[in-house]
């Protein structure tokens, strides 16, 4: 029987996180080509890591929710969470993260933006 040590699990987790961040950076570049065409890869990667940490601090961990959170940051700015339309949802303690994201997507769709 194989034994997996904590260090091996941590290393695997870090590797998976790095891969997810690289994929999210690729998503950002593909989704917003004009915005990121001149961004160096490492700068975009650092930005993605920051956005992921910000999303996680608000309870968003599903990859599709993190990608949409990134969309909001790119479209509405780094402090979009403080905007009344977003803050009302994000500060609602009765909603779970997936429900909050669904509500944010709905509000953006009402404004004519399809995510």
Image (cartoon, grey):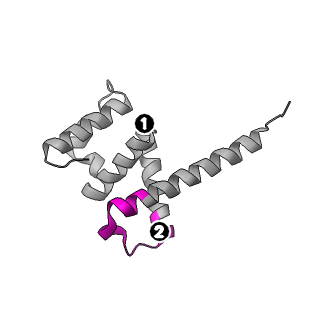
Residue 103 position in % (x across, y down) = 25, 34
Numbered mark located on residue 114 in the image: none
- Is 36 situated above or below 110? below
Residue drawn at x 29%, y 51% is: 72
Q: Which residue is mark 2?
A: 43
- For this rendering, which residue is in front, 11 or 81? 11
User: Which circle's residue, 2 or 1, is located before the other in the chain?
Assistant: 2
Q: Is 58 on the left-hand or right-hand side of 8?
A: left
- Is 111 situated above or below 26? above
Residue 113 position in % (x across, y down) = 18, 49
Q: Which residues are magenta?
A: 27-44
Q: Which residue is mark 1?
A: 59
Q: Magenta: predominant secondary structure element?
A: helix
Occupied quadrant, residue 24: bottom left
Residue drawn at x 51%, y 54% is: 21
Residue drawn at x 34%, y 47% is: 68
| Residue 98 inside the magenta-drawn segment | no
Q: Is residue 29 visible?
A: yes
Residue 94 position in % (x across, y down) = 32, 23
Q: Is residue 77 visible?
A: no
């Amino acid at each position: 029987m194989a034994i997996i040590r904590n260090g091996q699990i941590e290393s695997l987790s870090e590797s998976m996180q790095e891969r997810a961040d690289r994929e999210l950076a690729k998503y950002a570049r593909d989704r917003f080509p004009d915005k990121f065409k001149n961004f160096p890869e490492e700068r975009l990667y650092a930005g993605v890591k920051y956005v992921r940490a910000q999303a996680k601090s608000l309870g968003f961990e599903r990859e599709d929710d993190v990608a949409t959170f990134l969309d909001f940051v790119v479209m509405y700015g780094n402090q979009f969470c403080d905007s009344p339309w977003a803050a009302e949802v994000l500060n609602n303690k009765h909603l779970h993260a997936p429900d909050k994201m669904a509500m944010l997507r709905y509000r953006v769709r009402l404004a004519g933006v399809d995510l």
